[in-house]
Image (cartoon, rainbow, N blue to C red):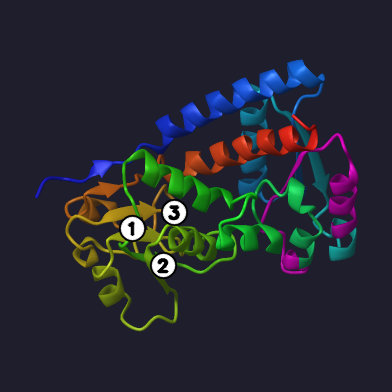
Amino acid sequence: MSQARLMDGTALARRIVDEAAKKAADLTERTGTAPCLATVLVGEDPASVTYVRMKQNRCRKAGITSRHVPLPADTTTEQLVGTLRDLSADPAVHGILLQHPMGPHIDERAAFEAIAPEKDVDGVTFASFATMSFGLPGFVSCTPGGIMRLLDEYGVDPAGRRAVVVGRSAILGKPAGMLLLARDATVTYCHSRTADLSAAVREADIVVAAVGRPRLIRGQDIKPGAVVIDAGYNAGNVGDVDFDSAVERASLITPVPGGVGPMTIATLLEQTVDAAARQLGV
């Protein structure tokens, strides 16, 4: 069997961002208001600081105004909720991104729920999860949304296929499974307590690895011809899939980096422009 074809998230993301930039320019010209994304960061975790700066740079290139709200590491849940509610009530802000993780002293769910659903461009609220699950209009979680766009780009129809999602986080694993289910895949969720993970993965036509453990999914467990989506990112540019062995058995596979990662930011920018258009009545 020949090696898997690489799913190029970088190229697709570039096209999505270019299209979002055109929409942002048109919106700005028609309304006199540029789309605005507020980023909120608690503390100074180096990876988070870098990630937020990268998102700000991408915003600028796409014609989206970026408002950064840095908060000290000792910010309480109550203070963070207050900040997010203020941003939700500010008509000049169209989208809100709360960078996570936030520290163990913060009630993450309470913070997410302080974001108005119409500004939840990162797809982290209960409301967004519900709209994803029921196939209603709303904002998707950015990484799962990006994964679905990649599947579409490469002609992968989930209908009738067995999809195994390894990971059950509220903003990646769970919504990824719900989006696949909405597209008529037969979905199995696996996680750290799954007995015989290898056996479950071997049944999958589509594997989404989103557990945050380097090289957890091995090539020998990939069904020949399966589509492998590696949404993991670990130290040293290593994903959750052992790429070198998986590429020998899969039909399509995402590289790390350059696969799912660029799609996450592209989806965020696209949803920010869409949010602005709705709020400005265009």
Q: Secondary structure at mark 2?
A: strand
Q: Badge 3, how many Cα within 10 Å: few under 14, some, many 20+?
A: many
Instruction: State the image quarter where residue 82 is shown.
Output: bottom right
Q: In the picture, which quadrant includes the C terminus?
A: top right
Give percent across and percent down for residue 103.
Answer: 72, 63
Residue type highlighted by circle 3: Ala
Q: Mark 2 and mark 1: span between their CA atoms?
A: 11 Å
Residue 66 visible here: yes
Q: Is residue 110 above or below residue 5?
A: below
Q: Name the residue located 54 percent from the left edge and 61 percent from the top edge.
A: 175
Q: Are marks 1 and 3 in contact (CB under 8 Å)?
A: no
Marks 1 and 3, how far apart in space?
A: 9 Å
Q: Residue 108 lies in magenta, yes or no?
A: yes
x then y, percent, for residue 183: 43, 57
Q: Position of residue 200 (x, y in %)?
A: 30, 74
Amino acid beneath label 2? Val
Q: How many marks?
A: 3
Earlier-in-chain disc, 1 versus 3? 3
Q: Residues within 10 Å of mark 1 (few under 14, many from 20)?
A: many
Question: Are the residues at dot 2 and dot 1 in contact (C-beta closer than 8 Å)?
Answer: no
| Residue labelled with disc 2 | 166
Q: Which residues are magenta?
A: 81-109
What SS does tag 1 mark?
A: loop
Q: Quadrant of residue 166?
A: bottom left
* Left or right: 218 as drawn, with respect to 51: left
Q: Is residue 205 above or below residue 15?
A: below
Can you name the residue that lies furthest to the top here?
Answer: 29
Name the residue furthest left: 1
Mark 1 — residue?
A: 241
The residue singled out by tag 3 in the image is 231
**Mark earlier in primary sequence (2, 1):** 2
